[in-house]
Image (cartoon, coloured by chain):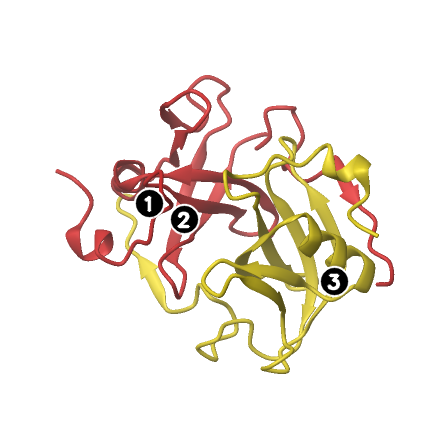
Chain colours: A red, B yellow
Amino acid sequence: MSLDPAIAARLKRTGDGLVPAIVQQYDTGEVLMLAWMDDEALHRTLTTGRATYWSRSRGSYWVKGDTSGHVQHVRSAALDCDGDTILLKVDQVGAACHTGDRTCFDADELAVNPK
Amino acid sequence: MSLDPAIAARLKRTGDGLVPAIVQQYDTGEVLMLAWMDDEALHRTLTTGRATYWSRSRGSYWVKGDTSGHVQHVRSAALDCDGDTILLKVDQVGAACHTGDRTCFDADELAVNPK
């Protein structure tokens, strides 16, 4: 089985065949991280309920939490208006970031001036 | 003036010289949209407080709301742990999506099974 053709037809992929996925904690609204999916990663995510990505650096599928235990249980998924971005709402076990931070955006705030 | 070299040195760009920016409503936590920035768009965003993107389809800078009135006032900005994604927290005036929806993720929910 592969990704539902009705979904695949709506996806707009980068030149590498990937779509960015924004990952958000379903109840607090925290944006946890951004990762990348190809059709197969999206198919696995939707059918298993476990967030599964394509690792651009390792060139392989990656079930979030398989090595760290920091699993993402998927509560909902949506495509954006252009079909070029996925929003996953998940229940994150432990830290989302490999640094141990809760989110990947906790450590490097940029100054905005003027606000 | 261009982007602070200390920030530019931390950015990891796609082959096109771009970085994805996740845009979130600062108080409700809604994920509004995803857009793309090059160094100049990020510089303008941080120095003017108005969210400014690079439009891949039009090949030009785009100050969100200049034509629609649906301005994004930037409250904070952060880089992720890898320097390859930006998180903007904004105060969105009106609809974020060009379709008139509040967010770009309101219209196309994907079934997750099992949850």
Kind of residue indicated by mark 2:
Arg
Left or right of B97? Residue B28 is right
Residue A19 rendering spot, x and y as whole percentages: 39, 45
Residue that appears at 45% across and 17% down: A67
Q: Is residue A81 above or below residue A36?
A: below
Tell me how far mark 1 sits from mark 2, CA to CA. 6 Å
Give residue A115's quadrant in the image: bottom right
Neighbourhood count class around disc 1 (C-alpha, 10 Å): few under 14, some 14–19, many 20 upward: some
Residue A24 rendering spot, x and y as whole percentages: 53, 48
Q: Nearer the viewer, mark 3 or mark 1?
A: 3
Disc 1 element: loop
Q: Which residue is mark 1?
A: B115
Q: Subunit of mark 3? A: B
Q: Which residue is mark 2?
A: A75
Dots 1 and 2: beta carbons under 8 Å?
yes
Kind of residue indicated by mark 1:
Lys
